[in-house]
């Protein structure tokens, strides 16, 4: 079942329709659906698909040769080209006569096994780009390699690509398309615990309860995801133990660099190097108060929901899970799920506001959204705003998000109004988001000001219809 990726497919189809030489780079974290995207795009097109393997140059050349000959002639053979240059030149010349797509998946494995592969590809692109109708796709899961060795200024292939696609996990509404049987609230919970990575979504059974899915996916030592975070780190980085310790520290509340350093037991400058790599991998996200880029105020949060849920709940229950006591482990987790979902709901509401902007339904034309925290000068206390977005020096929006079983009361609206008054904007729009709706008093108060918007969870769910 192929879902979503409309924008990426449209980009690839437009490149293909041009009929001239094109070179697209597709990259993204493992399990995010890169191969599925390419396979879907290649349907009903004359193409050569080759996936590199983590082996030597000889093995990759043999596999590449087999893919080329079988796809271009329909004949299965053990014949091997003498070199990658000969193999690639054959494809470029073949594409002088007709439109062909050559997709090289897991490109970093091929390029690492043959140090001259990138330079050879550069040479042939320059030689044939004006005469060949080839559409070349290079795809890779090693984010650092693709960015440094393919996209970067000093890379041999720099300046040759005609498009690049960084494939990201699905957002909340895209994730909802996977599940027909879950209720709306359950879809949010599933998004919160598994995220939007397609391979992980396939582990979810929407005919079971959220509780049963948590038990099957996370509280079962034989499940496909039980060791997924640590296995992914082993594939992506050296010294995974330190990375593991850093993510664990953040998951349990140590979000400032000094706190992470203290919890991990490594100097801050050492932790900074590891955190930089986790940011690049999309596992962590760096936050500063909205409108304030001061490094000292920066905090780090886990940006991937699967990682966030796993590191928050699995390690501390490992001994119980290993003994097959999933029910007991779930009882220890359940009381914290609503609190855990608070940040997830903020993320969902942020995505909803972007949807309003992109569909021209938002009165504030912001360029970014973020959380704000700082000092209330009047009360001399620390305070925060869940979501904030600025249009210009005069106009901004402020939002509060409540994932609770109680209806949001007028007091929450008054608090948001009070916090918005910490800023000097003349035009302020207030958004209240609630899972469970709003009290009569809150609705009546909001009706007095057309710049106050009350958004229930049901309205968010309608955004994709």
Image: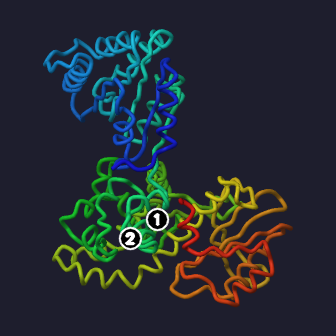
What is the quadrant of the C terminus in the image? bottom right
Mark 1 to mark 2 CA distance (whole Å): 41 Å
Which colouring convention does the figure follow? rainbow
Q: How many marks?
A: 2
Residue at figure coordinates x 54%, y 28% from the top left: 153
The answer to which image quadrant residue 307 occupies is bottom left
Q: Is residue 28 or residue 6 the one in the foreground?
A: 6
Considering the numbered disc 1 on the image, is that residue within a helix, a strand or a loop? Answer: helix
Residue 328, horizontal then vertical, whole percent: 24, 84
- Answer with left or right where residue 289 lies relative to residue 9: right
The answer to which image quadrant residue 118 occupies is top left
Q: Residues within 10 Å of mark 2 (few under 14, many from 20)?
A: some
For label 2, the residue is 182
For label 1, the residue is 261
Residue at figure coordinates x 67%, y 78% from the top left: 383
Q: Is residue 461 or residue 210 the one in the foreground?
A: 461
Q: Is residue 447 or residue 61 the one in the foreground?
A: 447
Residue at figure coordinates x 30%, y 23% from the top left: 114
Residue 169, horizontal then vertical, whole percent: 44, 53
| Mark carried by residue 168 | none
């Amino acid at each position: 079942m192929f879902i979503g990726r409309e924008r990426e497919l449209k980009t690839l189809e437009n490149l293909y329709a041009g009929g001239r030489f094109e070179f697209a780079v597709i990259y993204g974290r493992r399990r995010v659906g890169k191969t599925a995207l390419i396979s879907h795009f290649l349907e009903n097109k004359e193409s050569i698909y080759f996936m590199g393997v983590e082996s030597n140059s000889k093995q990759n050349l043999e596999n590449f040769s087999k893919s080329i000959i079988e796809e271009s002639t329909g004949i299965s053979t053990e014949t091997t080209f003498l070199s990658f240059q000969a193999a690639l030149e054959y494809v470029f010349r073949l594409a002088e006569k007709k439109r062909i797509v050559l997709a090289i998946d897991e490109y970093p494995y091929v390029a690492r096994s043959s140090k001259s592969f990138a330079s050879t590809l550069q040479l042939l692109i320059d030689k044939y780009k004006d005469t060949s109708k080839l559409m070349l796709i290079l795809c890779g899961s090693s984010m650092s390699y693709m960015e440094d060795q393919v996209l970067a200024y000093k890379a041999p292939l720099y300046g040759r690509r005609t498009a690049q696609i960084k494939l990201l996990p699905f957002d909340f509404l895209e994730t909802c398309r996977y599940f027909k049987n879950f209720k709306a609230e359950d879809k949010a919970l599933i998004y919160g615990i598994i995220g939007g990575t397609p391979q992980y979504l396939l582990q979810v059974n929407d005919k079971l309860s959220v509780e049963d899915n948590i038990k099957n996916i996370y509280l079962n030592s034989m499940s496909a995801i039980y060791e997924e975070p640590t296995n992914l780190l082993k594939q992506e980085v050296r010294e995974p133990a330190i990375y593991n310790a850093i993510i664990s520290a953040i998951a349990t509340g140590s979000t400032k660099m000094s706190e992470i350093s203290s919890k991990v037991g490594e100097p801050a400058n050492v932790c900074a190097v590891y955190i930089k790599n986790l940011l690049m991998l999309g596992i962590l996200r760096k936050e500063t108060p909205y409108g304030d880029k001061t490094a000292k105020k920066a905090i780090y949060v886990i940006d991937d929901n699967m990682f966030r849920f796993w590191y928050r709940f699995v390690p501390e229950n490992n001994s119980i899970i290993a003994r097959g006591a999933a029910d007991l482990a779930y009882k220890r987790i359940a009381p914290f799920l609503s609190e855990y979902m608070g940040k997830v709901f903020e993320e969902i509401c942020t995505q909803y506001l972007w949807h309003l902007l992109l569909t021209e339904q938002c009165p504030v034309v912001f360029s970014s959204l973020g959380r704000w925290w700082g000092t209330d000068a009047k009360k001399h206390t620390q305070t925060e705003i869940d979501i904030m977005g600025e249009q210009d020096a005069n106009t901004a929006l402020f939002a509060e998000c409540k994932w609770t079983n109680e209806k949001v009361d007028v007091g929450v609206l008054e608090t948001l109004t009070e916090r918005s008054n910490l800023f000097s904007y003349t035009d302020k729009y207030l958004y209240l988001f609630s899972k469970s709706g709003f009290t009569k008093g809150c609705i009546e108060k909001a009706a007095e000001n057309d710049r106050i918007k009350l958004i229930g969870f049901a309205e968010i769910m309608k955004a994709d219809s």
